[in-house]
Image (spheres, rainbow, N blue to C red):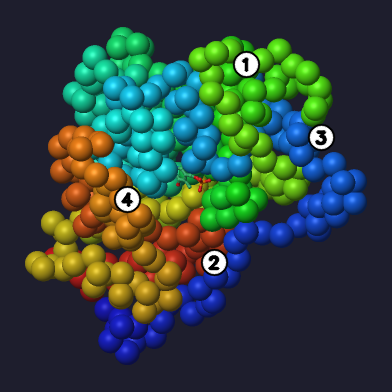
Amino acid sequence: MSKLAINGGEKVFDKEADIIGWPPKYDDTEKLLCEIYRSAKWSFNGKYERLFDEKFAAYQKAKYGVFMVNGTVTLESALAVFNIGPGDEVIVPAYTWIATGMAPLYLGATPVIVDIEPDTLCMSPEAFEAAITPRTKAVIPVHLYGSMADMDKICAIAKKNNIRVIEDCAHAHGTMWKDKAAGSIGDIGSFSFQESKTMPCGEGGICLTNDEKIFERLDRLAHIGYPREVKQGCKAEPPPMDLLCRNYRATDFQAAILLGHLKRLEEQTLLRDKNAKYITKRLKSVPGISVQKPGKNVTVQGFYVFALLLHFEELKEGTTRAEIIKALNAEGLAIGTGWGAGEPVFEQNLWNIPSDKYRVEDIRVTREYCGKRMITTSLTWLMLSEEDTSLICDAIEKVMAAYRK
Ligand SMILES: *Cc1c(COP(=O)(O)O)cnc(C)c1O
């Protein structure tokens, strides 16, 4: 067995940690940004805003898109169009970015936090069903990192109980599912284009839907009440009385950056999908580690993060996640533990919500799998050459061999 780099042995992956660099920059996007700047037409039904709505919705197989300022207000808006508010409950998974848990709180509703599945790390349909009460109005499954929640089961349970389904697709750009795509399965799909995401534009988000009425409400809500066809300053039919409208409009600058990413999304997604499949295959025979499972029925997997799970039962007694991460880091692999150390949403650093404002169900799987077993890497890992991808597997194999039982 070769000596681990952490013990003075030779490093397997001796390259820059950030080989690719994210976000990517494109000359055609730079040119378009300059043109938009010179045009002095930047927002309010801008040409590129509306083009992006259309093109991104089509890519994700949805009929309508409403582009907004970020992927937090898209979640809030998705709940708001259904008049969700005080006294209502919204079910969310225990492991997610805080925005998913905060969205119901912005409207005075109560987030109900439920467990995840140990293989996909996405919301457990059984846990969702068990948490339903007469107050439950919506559920927000999160398609975590590059996997997908079990939408067949979640949608069936939701339908039976008259619950709205909002897909949090902040990690699922380009993910295809049966004959549909992430974001076009539930009532509304919410995406984020924040700087760290798969399609970054600084700040941005979009809501997708197939329902014309939902689209019109979303569009008015994000557009301070205006219907789409009305020009700035012109008189419009006011929005319905039950819809409190905001200004959540984004600009043509962001849309132009996103159109540049969208042109390359399919090629990049297929590359990440291919490399992830290769790594998964290589690690199948390696004791102590596995790759986060893609969701059931996922045909092309979009990735935000590449997550792996440690299986301590196959490792030397007393081995810890911190030890494995240190050893992998020493071999040249940049690896972390997700948000914080994989804490549930209500224990994350920025969550300042009093405990009577939300409810937590039994979340044993989240504590065990995200809190102890999960290790994560950047999506750029999945965009390397075959040779580099193979080296990554060599490094993991080397470390795991040293810790196996
Ligand atoms: C990033 C993210 C969001 C929110 O996106 P912002 O654009 O940063 O507001 C929502 N949900 C999840 C799971 C995310 O990772």
Q: Above or below — where is 36 with respect to 166?
A: below
Residue highlighted by disc 1: 239
- Which amino acid, by three-letter code, is at mark 2? Glu
Q: Above or below — where is 146 with respect to 5?
A: above
**Whole-percent x and y of residue 127?**
22, 29
Residue highlighted by disc 4: 351
- Which amino acid, by three-letter code, is at mark 1? Pro
State the CA–CA distance, disc 1 to disc 2.
Answer: 57 Å
State the CA–CA distance, disc 4 to disc 2.
Answer: 42 Å
State the CA–CA distance, disc 1 to disc 4.
Answer: 34 Å
Disc with the residue nearer the chain's start (1 vs 2) = 1
What residue is at 50 percent from the left and 47 percent from the top? 303
Q: Do the numbered discs 3 and 2 sit on residues whose CB atoms are within 8 Å?
A: no
Name the secondary structure under disc 1: loop
Disc with the residue nearer the chain's start (4 vs 2) = 4
State the CA–CA distance, disc 3 to disc 2.
Answer: 42 Å
* Image depth: mark 4 or mark 2 in front: 4
Name the secondary structure under disc 2: helix
Classify 10 Å Cα crowding around label 1: few (below 14), some (14-19), many (20 and above).
some
Give the side of residue 10 with respect to residue 128, left or right. Answer: right
**Whole-percent x and y of residue 131?**
21, 25
State the CA–CA distance, disc 4 to disc 3.
Answer: 38 Å
Would residue 259 be seen by someone viewing this image from the given angle?
no
What residue is at 24 percent from the left and 14 percent from the top? 134
Classify 10 Å Cα crowding around label 2: few (below 14), some (14-19), many (20 and above).
few
Residue highlighted by disc 3: 47
Give the side of residue 363 with respect to residue 377, left or right. Answer: left
